[in-house]
Image (tube, grey):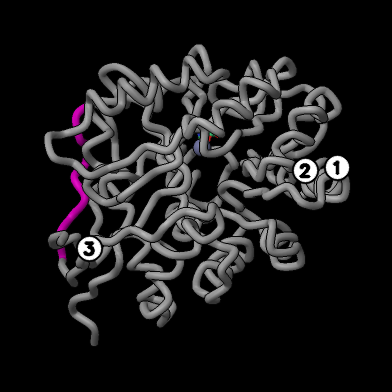
Amino acid sequence: MTQRLTIRRPDDWHVHLRDGAMLEAVLPWTARQFGRAIVMPNLDPPVTDMARARAYRERIHATLPEGAGFQPLMTCYLTDRTDPDDLALGHAEGVFTAAKLYPAGATTNSAHGVTDIANIRPVLERMERIGMPLLVHGEVTDPEIDIFDREAVFLERVLAPLRRDFPALNVVLEHVTTAEGVAFVEEGGSGLAATITPHHLIINRNALFAGGLRPHAYCLPVAKRERHRLALRRAATSGSARFFLGTDSAPHTVERKESACGCAGVWNAPFALEAYTAVFDAEGALDRLEAFSSENGPRFYGLPLNSGTVTLERSAGMVPERIGEVVPFGAGESFGWSLAADA
Ligand code: NCD
Ligand code: ZN
C-alpha cells in the first residue's frame, strides 16, 4: 500500500479568497498547498475591471506569508456592461487570466451578474479572438426550475448554444456537479473542460440533512444524488485531461453559515489535497492524481507546469472542528492523508 506520494505542486483552478480579515485568515491555507490559484471575482463590490483586479491582486500579495511562492491568477466578473477593450487590455497585460460568467442571482454576490448572454456577445467574441478562457457558473436562475436541476437545464439552455455560437472560445464548466455535466464535457471538444471540487466528490445531497439541517454541507451548486457523485468520481479519476482540480473553497463565518438563511459555500482549503487524495486512493487511482491536480489545468490554460513538489503521507490526522471563525470541510474527521512537506 502506498504510504507516501510525491507529486508536482498542484494549482487550484477555482478559489474564493475573499478580502480583508477573511483573506488574511484563509490565504495561507491555499498558499501552503497550491502554486497558483484562479481567484474568483465575486467580492462586494465585484472585480469587474482591470483597475479593481490590479488592486485586489496587490492586496493578496500584501497578505501572503513571507516567502510564499504563491501566484494569484485574477478573473474578471462579467456584467451586462463589461467593456471588451478593458477586458482585452487586462488580458494582454497579464492582469486577467480569465473571465467569470455568473448568471445574475445564481449565487453569493452574483446580483451584478449577466442577465442575458445576448448582452455580452461582443465580450465573448473578443475573448474567443484573443484566446481568453470563459469560466462559467453553470446554473440557470429561473425560480421555476428545481434547484437540483439547475445545472442540467443550464447545459441545454445556455451552454450548448454558447458553444455553437463561439466554437473557438475556451470554456470551463466550473464545479461540475452532475452526470449530465460530465457527459456534456466528455462530448465537447478540446476547448471545453470542467473543474471538480473535493466536496462534490465526497458528499451527496443526503449530507445536507444527515440527522438534521447541516449548513456546512450547503454550497452552490448544491450537492446532488449519489449517481451524480459517482459520475464525478469516475470523471476525475478517468485520466481525461479535461477534468481538473478546482476546490471552490468558499469560506463564510460560522455565524453566517449557522443562520436562518445560511450562506452557500464550503471552506475546504485547509485539507483540500488530503480530500482529493483520499478520493483517488479509494478509487485505486493514485497514479492519476498528479495529472488531475497539477497538469491538466495548466495545459488547458496554456500555462507552464509548476516546478516544485508536494508530498502526501498516510496519516490519521484529524481536521479541526473550527479554524478561527470558519468550519473547515471534514471537521472532526480524518481524510487518512496529510500534506508532509514541499520542495
Ligand atoms: C461561493 C461563494 O460563497 O462565494 N459559494 C459557493 O457555494 N460555492 C459562490 C459560488 O462559487 O457559487
Ligand atoms: Zn465558486
Q: Residue furthest top?
A: 45
Residue 247 visible to an observer of this rendering: yes
Relative to 39, residue 201 above or below: below
**Crowding at mark 3 (Cα within 10 Å: few <14, some 14-19, many 20+):** some
Residue numbers of the magenta segment: 316-324
**Front position among marks 3 and 2:** 3
User: In what element is the residue under mark 1?
Assistant: helix
The type of residue carrying mark 3 is: Val
Q: Could you say which is closer to the camera, residue 42 or residue 268? A: 42
The type of residue carrying mark 2 is: Phe
Identify the disc placed on residue 154: 2
Picture residue at 36% right of the left edge, 77% below the top: 286
Residue at the spot of label 1: 157
Q: How far apart are marks 3 and 2 (CA)?
A: 37 Å
**Crowding at mark 1 (Cα within 10 Å: few <14, some 14-19, many 20+):** few
Residue at the spot of label 3: 310
Labels 2 and 1 touching (C-beta < 8 A): yes
Task: Label the magenta part by its dominant secondary structure.
Answer: loop
For the N terminus, the quadrant is bottom left
> Where does the image place residue 199, in percent across and percent down from the top left?
44, 52
Q: Distance between the residues labelled 3 and 1?
A: 41 Å
User: In what element is the residue under mark 3?
Assistant: strand
**Crowding at mark 2 (Cα within 10 Å: few <14, some 14-19, many 20+):** some
> Where does the image place residue 8, in percent across and percent down from the top left?
30, 66
Picture residue at 72% right of the left edge, 15% below the top: 81
